[in-house]
Image (cartoon, rainbow, N blue to C red):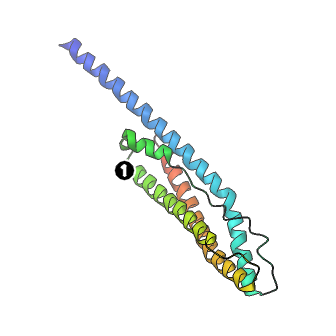
Amino acid sequence: MIGVYLGFLVTDCSSEKQTNEKRNALVKNISAELTSNKNRLEQVVDYHRMVRDSVRYYLQHPKPISGPGFFRGTNTMTLPRSAFETGIQTGIINELSIDKIQALNTTYTHQDSYNEFGMLMLQGLITMDFDESKESIEKIFRFLSISMTDVVIKEEDLLKQYDKTLSLLNSEEK
């Protein structure tokens, strides 16, 4: 009887150790994914601020302009969520504490909203007339002013959410 009990105890300890290793690997992978996404956003947020501010300036100070020479595209990107999805699909996400799961859900919901907004903004821009008329240029500037204001707000919020979630993920679960 004692031998059977010890066998169960060893098996249970081994199983718990494997679960902890999988959880720690998931946290490491999600942290790496969030850090990568954060770095990618940090590389474009200044460009989006510049476009927003330049367009606002041109709208407030009308001058003869031939088009937005400072504009190099929307430069939004699709931010991946594969590590998070892997955690959900394997069920390992359930090994995290509820506050970490909620923080991850909030972060990835913000990220999904950013991804969707980037697609909508690109679709809106594609449907615009790109001729050299003053009306066309002003219409594009108004669109960019509104869009870039919104995209910068989304990026700044998402960057804060990344910091908050990364701090929480890296707190006690090692």
> Who is closer to the viewer here, 130 or 107?
130
Q: Is residue 43 left or right of residue 119?
A: right
Q: Is residue 60 left or right of residue 20?
A: right
Query: Would residue 174 be visible to someone looking at this image?
Result: no
Q: Kindly indicate the quadrant of the structure image that contains residue 67.
A: bottom right
Mark 1 nearby-residue class (10 Å; few <14, some 14–19, many ≥20):
few
Residue 142 location in percent, x, y?
Answer: 65, 80
Identity, as a three-letter code, of the amino acid under mark 1: Ile
Q: Kindly indicate the quadrant of the structure image that contains residue 44.
A: bottom right
Q: Kindly indicate the quadrant of the structure image that contains residue 2.
A: top left
Query: Would residue 121 be visible to someone looking at this image?
Result: yes
Q: Is residue 149 left or right of residue 15?
A: right
Q: Relative to 168, is 19 above or below?
A: above
> Who is closer to the viewer here, 162 or 81?
81
Q: Residue at x 63, y 77 (%)?
A: 143
Identify residue for label 1: 98
Callout 1: SS: helix
| Screen quadrant of the N terminus | top left
Q: Residue at x 57, y 55 (%)?
A: 78
Identity of the residue furthest to the left in this view: 1
Residue 52 location in percent, x, y?
Answer: 68, 73
Q: Residue at x 46, y 36 (%)?
A: 24
Q: Relative to 32, is 19 above or below?
A: above
Residue 155 location in percent, x, y?
Answer: 59, 63
